Image (cartoon, rainbow, N blue to C red):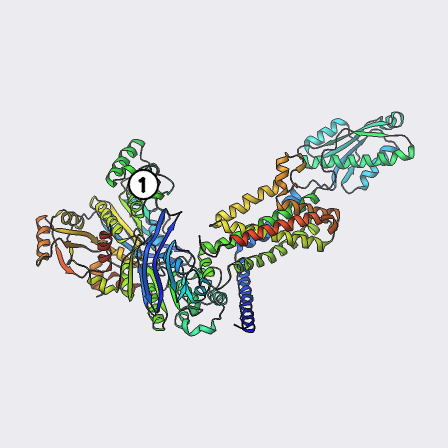
Amino acid sequence: MDEEKVITCKSLSKKFGDFYAVNEITFDVNKGEIFGFLGANGAGKTTAMRMLCGLSFPSSGEATVAGFDVYKQQEFIKKNIGYMSQKFSLYENLSILENIEFFGGVYGLDRKEIKERSGLLIQTLGLEKEAKKMVGELPLGWKQKLAFSVAIFHRPKIVFLDEPTGGVDPVTRRQFWDMIYEAAATGITIFVTTHYMDEAEYCNRISIMVDGKVEALDSPSNLKSKFSVHSMDDVFYQLARGASRSAD
Amino acid sequence: MTFFTSWHVERADQQINMKQLLAFTKKEFYQVIRDKRTLLIMFGLPIVQIILFGFALTSEVKNVHLIISDNSKDVNTLQIINKIKASSYFSVDESVMGYADIEEAFKQGTVKSALIFPSDFAKDLVHSGKAQVQIIADGSDPNTAKTIVNYLTAIINDYQAQLSPTVGLPYKIIPETRMLYNEEGNGSLNFIPGVMALILMIVCTALTSVSVVKEKELGTMEILLVSPFKPFMVLISKAIPYLALSIANFTVIILLSVYALDVEIKGSILLLFMESILFIITCLSLGLLISNVTASQQTALLISMMGLQIPTLIFTGFMFPLENMPWIFQAISKIIPAHWYYLIVKSVMLKGLGFEGVWKETLILIGMTVVLLTVALKNFKIRLS
Amino acid sequence: MNAVTVKNITKTYDKGKVLAVDNISFEVKEGELFGLIGPDGAGKTSIFRILTTLLLADKGEASVAGFDVIKDYQSIRNNVGYMPGKFSLYQDLTVAENLSFFATVFGTTIEANYDLIKDIYDQIKPFSNRRAGKLSGGMKQKLALCCALIHKPLVLLLDEPTTGVDVVSRKEFWEMLKTLKKQGITILVSTPYMDEANLCERIALLQKGKIMSVDTPENIIKAFPYTLYGAKSDQIYKLLNDLRLNGQVESCYAFGEFLHVTLKEKQENGKKILRVIAEQNGHSNIWIEEIKPGIEDSFILLSGEQG
């Protein structure tokens, strides 16, 4: 695997008053890696991810995302990442084409580029006939594939996925992971935050946050053998059971 | 089943119902008291509105600095000046200013109003029975200006009426202004009933509809529907706490009006309370009706605020005189409950009329309430749609 | 007697345009822990709402605890404990206030049925004066379960109680359900998590409003007709494509760490065949083993058959 680092994180912390939401986390993510970022609700996942996406400033520590500093170069970070969450991704009352155009425009692509790429994208997804349909009318599986395609439309270096496949049917979920694998194979780094353990199993490496700290960081199989259990569920259970914090 | 057992079962049912009702009411009170936003709307809104409408928009004036330039200095002008001094509206300054000086004072903003008697005022009045005075007011504050003009005109007219019978000649003092505004001569009084209608309307309808829809959004409504609690009891128990709160609210408005704005309640306070409770029930029914047809708190709030506040503002007649509106608007105003409540409050509070003066309006309001409440209860779904 | 009977139930929305439940039949025995397993949009919530009398089915019959969902809806409302999918209690009431409110609404008191909820309530008791809105997801869910149990229902209907809840709380929740089952309460529960299927006695696999299979989880897995192989190499995405393109491979999809692969014809040496394919395509660190299928494998197979 390419050892180029796209995310580096060194003793990164975020303090709210006396409370360490994120407490000195340190990890690196390699280019083209599918990195799972796990933790129970309230463990500090979201806060950490916000700092990495350039949405909030760390209290201390260092971090770079796509080579840019999280303190000084937030605007560059935002241009080089994509984001998709299961809850919100696309506008239901805009057509497929309009959604693509909108998000392309948001990321500063020029008209010609948008036109070329959206044509290509619709062709790859096999949505030629549906291109003018409202996104709200699409079946969930297609919506999700489209949402992911839109998230990587501007060819970001890293794409952040927030619980991308929760509640989705197994077949669609597989198709979705196909796309993620494909994107990773082209060198896009995939950063998945989730508390669904079966999503975690797909990742090359995962980190598990408990009470603001990264308590485990390894490949799923190594973690399972380290804790001598059979599933990631059990790994997580052992780590998170002792957690003192939990909130929504 | 014998009669006795069936009666017994019913009794037990009723006891449960009463307990449930009580529990529900308690819950609702807790929720309102703990929800700072609701409380703010509930009690902040009336206070702000009353103060806004009462003070800022009021056309009442007190102790206005008035310059009188008396170039005639005779018995008549002296009498008029004394009359003005006797009223509490003006603090009179009888400086010997020339016209140019007065204009300069206006420009500098040190003076808001002036009354000028021409030098031949008395002569004109005695010889031709006609005399002119000039009233100048600062038009940059049109509300106050108009009021000042009105008051002065009223005082002069009053004097003229006093003068005529004793002298036996039809004397006429013509102020250089016209009666433009506010016949009753007191501004804030007219606003109070309107503001009351507006506030009760918004608070009752918005809060009731939002609190019902909130349960739908939370998913608790599903539980309540699946429970043995009778669906229409859900509505009743929603209405009770808001009825109580609205009455408290109404009391706050009345106290504010009486003590902060010096409004005198001429009619029976009891009648005013009863009529207001009726109107509150009308609003609650409307709120329940809105909650039936909306699924999100935002929609409910939007309908209650926009859909009701604007028509209430326009069609009650307290901001814009209804008589000047096209017939279609006047017709619409007849189906707005707030319109009738406004008429009732005006009659009872300002004119001092008793029930015999407002029974027609009351009957209309009762009719509206019955219709609204029936529709709301009928439409309340015992299942999800 | 069956605690829940569903017979040829069909439900559509938008004047028949959206088919949510398509001619479904199943039965839940008294005292059983029965799971409705299916993704979002499979029709789980519609079934629950029909059973709780909140919705009327277009066609078919259903009964809960012996009461017909249409004729005896009032009796059902008295005898069923229900936790809707998005049930979240009154955020601004405390734990104790929520519980006593629901007790009163159901015409009972906390004390009357305390033994039933005791085990669960003890876990949240230290927070009884805390507002429900300030509780963690897991604790909220425990409180919601207490509220659903407070009137000692004959049948407990739980619509996706573990969705969005962390692993630890999910485990605890299933433990609680087992305890309740021992006390004789029939439980019908739905979940989108395939791995939770094994915790139920019997399950119905739902997809697009249809039931694909009703049986015990073991039997459903046993019915999986293929030998299933797990495969991985250093380039998992390439391996996925390579295997799919091979004529001998029936199906291949990503499944956590490995790929799950089945072969077209039953082969004695399937492992070897797959290894050869991988080696021919230049893969390194190849790992191939025969593995036991899970509910999710069955689900994928069945939904493929359904089209």
Residue ID at (43%, 67%): C79
Q: Is residue B310 above or below residue C301?
A: above
SS at circle 1: helix
Q: Nearer the viewer, residue B319 or B343?
A: B343
Q: Nearer the viewer, residue B223 or A92?
A: B223
Across and down, in percent, residue A56 comes to 37, 48
Residue ID at (8%, 49%): C280
Across and down, in percent, residue B282 comes to 61, 51
Q: Nearer the viewer, residue B1 or B345?
A: B1
Kind of residue at badge 1 = Lys
Q: Is residue A221 above or below residue C112?
A: above
Give the total of numbered labels: 1
Q: Is residue C221 visible?
A: yes
Q: Quadrant of residue B141?
A: top right
Apparent side of residue A90 relative to residue B382 in the rendered image (left or right): left
Q: Is residue A174 above or below residue C131?
A: above
Apparent side of residue C15 relative to residue B342 in the rendered image (left or right): left
Across and down, in percent, residue B203 comes to 58, 51
Q: Is residue C171 visible?
A: no
Name the residue beneath numbered marker 1: A79
Q: Nearer the viewer, residue B220 or A113?
A: B220
- Chain that bears disc 1: A
Across and down, in percent, residue C102 comes to 47, 65
